[in-house]
Image (spheres, helix red, strand yellow):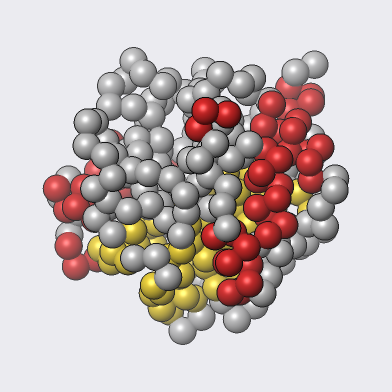
Amino acid sequence: PLVATDLAGLSPQQDTLVWLGHSSWYLQLAGQRILIDPVFSNYAAPFSFLNKAFAGDYPWTAQTMPEIDLLIISHDHYDHLDLATIKALMPKIKRVITPLGVGSHLRYWGMRSEIIEERDWNQSVRVTDSLIVHVLPARHFSGRGIKRNQTLWASFMFETPEQSVYYSGDSGYGPHFKAIGEQFGSVDLAIMENGQYDQDWKFIHMMPEETAQAAADLHAKAVLPGHAGRFVLAKHTWDDPYKRLALASRRQDYRLLTPMLGEPVILSEPDQPFTAWWQQATQ
């Protein structure tokens, strides 16, 4: 199921989050249009015949995007950093924040150096008077092709006077979640990795039960899962992440948000209803 939201038609003054599949997110916060890890290609790999997207219409392209005030790239894996998408978006991007080293890819592809800001863990960028972006730890790795760990990976906190939104990027479970929760006190909304996992990869990708615990460690008030729903990078069934996280979340204090692909989440409406759409999709 999909809601083909016209992102350019959204009021920029309405704090809104839209899941664009896998780990691609469109966030409007404090008047800023923020695009996170966009992958609009129908594959997430160096070659188009690998890691193809699920069949079906995908309505978002660089052409349908509004002007992007801020682009966030969490790390340089193909399912988070896509050459074709970035090149097509370049004329619309005003500013970029990445972990250390990731900007080298963007500059090589032709992006202007002056708009790229690279940061280490636990460094911050004041984007406007009303928005600070904190670059924070994650437990993962990086690399494209045969090169490994020459660039950094990260999670992010978007902080305004009214609220905080956390994005986990890709990460295994670790003590950094509790440290971030203690640093910020609580998180209004945590966008959490929940999909493409395997027990053999537990140090770089969380199981759904670990995602639930990580959100609790963050003192999250609401949780929105991602890293699923578009590409197949692991052996589990497509709906396993949703079923397991929904079950694990029953024991937690946060509210689990489950919008359909493209369904806007209005951040000022904490009681906005959502359906268990994955149950309907399997009937």
- The image quadrant of residue 135 is bottom left
Instruction: List x then y, in percent, for residue 145.
Output: 24, 31
Q: Quadrant of the N terminus?
A: top right
**Image side of residue 46 versus residue 130, left or right:** left
Q: 248 or 109, which lies in front?
A: 248
- Give the residue displayed 71% in from the left and 47% down from the top: 212
Q: 75 or 138, which lies in front?
A: 138
Is residue 123 in view from this perspective? yes
**Image side of residue 206 versus residue 37, left or right:** right
- Give the residue displayed 71% in from the left and 64% down from the top: 219
**Image side of residue 109 versus residue 97, left or right:** left
Q: 232 or 205, which lies in front?
A: 205
- The image quadrant of residue 226 is top right
Instruction: List x then y, in percent, for residue 82.
Output: 32, 38
Instruction: List x then y, in percent, for residue 206.
Output: 58, 40
- The image quadrant of residue 52 is top left
